[in-house]
Image (tube, rainbow, N blue to C red):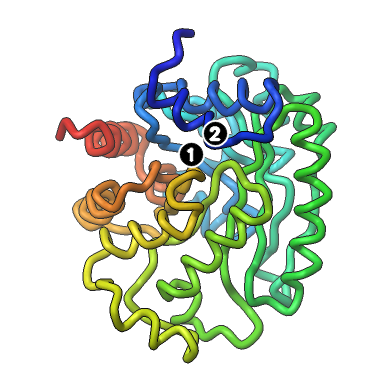
Amino acid sequence: MRMTRIVRSILANYESDNPGTKSNLARILMNGKLGGTGKLLILPVDQGYEHGPARSFAPNPEAYDPHYHYKLAIDANLSAYAAPLGMIEAGADSFAGQIPTILKMNSSTSLATEKDQAIHGSVDDALRLGCSAVGFTIYPGSNYQFEMMEELRDIALEAKGVGLVIVVWSYPRGGKLSKEGETAIDVCAYAAHIAALMGAHIIKIKPPTMHIEQEEAKKVYKDIDLTSLSNRVAHVMKSSFNKRRIVVFSGGASKDTEGLLKEIRQIKNGGANGSIIGRNTFQRPREEALALLEEIIKIYKGKE
């Protein structure tokens, strides 16, 4: 694998990491059709925990099979595939070495009464399964945010020590945050910054809206142009160590194709490193999903 100049420049931003971690990060950055461009397109399939099997997979029944998601990510030539322990285990042998994998280590459920997550995977699991990275969710704003941050600290220390990449899902929710505040620009930028401060290599957040949640932040934001999603994404990138950390944006709830592609164009124009899209792909029929992923790749390559 001959590394591109862009990937070398990204790796140079991670000054404290060992060769093992940088090799795994390079593997993700160099994989698939976006390999070497500095852009990423990742398939995450942790929605079974978050929403239950029927809400996640019934729109496309083939998606009940863990092998379906491996094949979709591989055939679409994506950057990586992220999933919880059982999903990774179910195809670890059949698809070994065919795509970088990210072990999602904690989750919540729609049955929970608190904004918290349970840890259900380990660094040892990630190594045993040949994963390139571990993924971990934090809920900035939750009553359990500090416990989650402390859990992430310990996992990140262990994972970095054995050469794994840290991917942080930084999703504000709970506590005093309003529902609208979960995707407010001031809160999303704050969440991305917290993930960077926690030592994340790759940060996943939701596309931010124009809403400003924190009263104290309104004075600052009145002089920042937030009218377009591109501008809001650019602000999040600046908040992530001035683009020194990789930030990818989620696809969120299911959207029509044109609406999703329009959003991704704006995310790309804001300087984001890419997208991490689950339900908007695997809930579609396979051929339709592959065609959609190809269009997204073209957007990030600037070739649409």
Q: Which mark is residue 43?
A: 1
User: Which residue: 51% across, 45% down?
Assistant: 245
User: Which residue: 37% across, 81% down?
Assistant: 211
Q: Are the residues tagged 2 and 1 within 8 Å (C-beta)?
A: yes
Under mark 1, the amino acid is: Leu
Q: Which mark is residue 81?
A: 2
Instruction: Identify the secondary structure beneath mark 2.
Output: strand
| Label 2 Cα crowd, 10 Å radius (few <14 / some 14-19 / many 20+) | many
Q: Vertically, is 105 above or below 210?
A: above
Q: In the shown orientation, is residue 285 left or right of residue 42?
A: left
Is 127 or 38 nearer to us in this picture? 38
Is 143 or 223 nearer to us in this picture? 223
| Rendered-image quadrant of the C terminus | top left
**Chain-order first, disc 2 or disc 1:** 1
Under mark 2, the amino acid is: Tyr
Q: Vertically, is 127 above or below 217?
A: above
